[in-house]
Amino acid sequence: MSKISITKKTAWSLILSINTNTKYKTKRNIIEISEQSQKNTLQIRYNRKKNYIEDTNINLKKDIENLFHIFLPIVCFQGKFQYIAHIAQSLDGFIATESGESKYISGKENLEHIHRLRAVSDVIIVGAKTYLEDKPKLTTRLVKGNNPLIYVFDPKRILRKKDIMGDIVHLRDNLDEMKKTLHDKERQTIYIEGGGRTISYFMNKNILNKIHICLCPIILGGGRPSFIPDKYIALNNQKSFKPNHYQMGNDILFDIEIN
C-alpha cells in the first residue's frame, strides 16, 4: 500500500490533536494513533520508550520525520508534570549582549519551533528580568495552537504590581503554588523559555525533564551566558548527555533528555 503524503502543516495539526487526545490505545510503551485528515485516516504506531515510529501509513519525508521525532516524546509523555526548557545561544555560549539585546540570535525556523513548544504547553514560564527587558508576547502567532498560561518567575521579588499585565501570573519561587492553580488535566507540560538564570534555576534543582539548546552560527565574544552553574560543581561530576540534533536553517537544535 502506498504511503500518504502530507504537508508539515498537516503533521503539526496531527501532533496538536495527539496532545489533547487521550483516546488512543496504549499497550505498555506502544501508542496506536489514528486521526482523520480530509479524506485520509492517518495512522502511527509509536514506541515512546525508544522514540521510534514502528509503523505508519504516512510518507515520512525528512522534515515530517524530524517534527514527529521532536514532538511525539513531548505529547506522549508519561507522568503528571513535564518540564521543558529552550535556549538559543551563540557558538561561544551567550544568549544576549551585555546590554540584554537577544533578538534574532536564532533564525526563523527556530523561532517557529519556539512557538510550537508554546502551543503544546499548558504553562510558559519566563524570568522577571527577561519579562521586563524583552516584553515578550509569548503567543503562538506563528503556528497553529492555543496560547499557554503565562507565569513570570520572580524569586528575587523585582516586579511591582504595575509590571504585571493582563492574565499573567506572578510566580515567586513556590512551584507547588503554581501546580495548585493549573486546571485539572491528566498531564501538564510546563515550558521554561528563559532567560538563562531562570532555566539554570530549574536545571540546578533537577526539575527539568528535557532541554532544547539551539546553537546559532554567530560569535558574540561576551555577554550574558546561557547557564549559571553551581559554583562548587566539580567537572568530573558532570553528566554527559546523548542529544539528538536537527538542522534548523543555519542553526542546530540539540534535543536533550535530562531526567
Image (tube, helix red, strand yellow):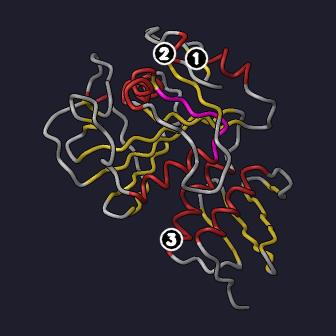
Mark number displayed over residue 63:
3
Looking at the image, tell me whether mark 2 or mark 1 is earlier in sequence order. Answer: 2
Residue at (35% x, 56% y) in the render: 107
Q: Amino acid at mark 3?
A: Asp
Quadrant assignment for the N terminus:
bottom right
Query: Is there a contact, CB below 8 Å, between mark 2 and mark 1?
Result: yes
Q: Is residue 17 left or right of residue 119?
A: right
Residue at (74% x, 56% y) in the render: 18
Span of residues in magenta: 120-126
Q: Crowdedness of circle 2 by 10 Å Cα count: few (<14), some, many (20+)?
A: some
* Figure check: 12 above or below 92: below
Residue at (45% x, 24% y) in the render: 127
* Figure check: 224 above or below 55: above
Looking at the image, tell me whether mark 1 or mark 3 is earlier in sequence order. Answer: 3
Q: Amino acid at mark 1?
A: His
Point out residue 184 in the picture as x, y percentages from the top left corner. Answer: 81, 30
Looking at the image, tell me whether mark 3 or mark 2 is earlier in sequence order. Answer: 3
Q: Crowdedness of circle 3 by 10 Å Cα count: few (<14), some, many (20+)?
A: some
Residue corresponding to mark 2: 154
Point out residue 7 in the picture as x, y percentages from the top left corner. Answer: 61, 75
Total count of labels: 3
Q: Crowdedness of circle 1 by 10 Å Cα count: few (<14), some, many (20+)?
A: many
- Asked if residue 68 is among those painted magenta in the image, a careful observer would answer no
Residue corresponding to mark 1: 170
Element on which disc 2 rests = loop
Question: Between tags 3 and 2, which lies in front?
Answer: 2
Quadrant of the image occupied by residue 32: bottom right
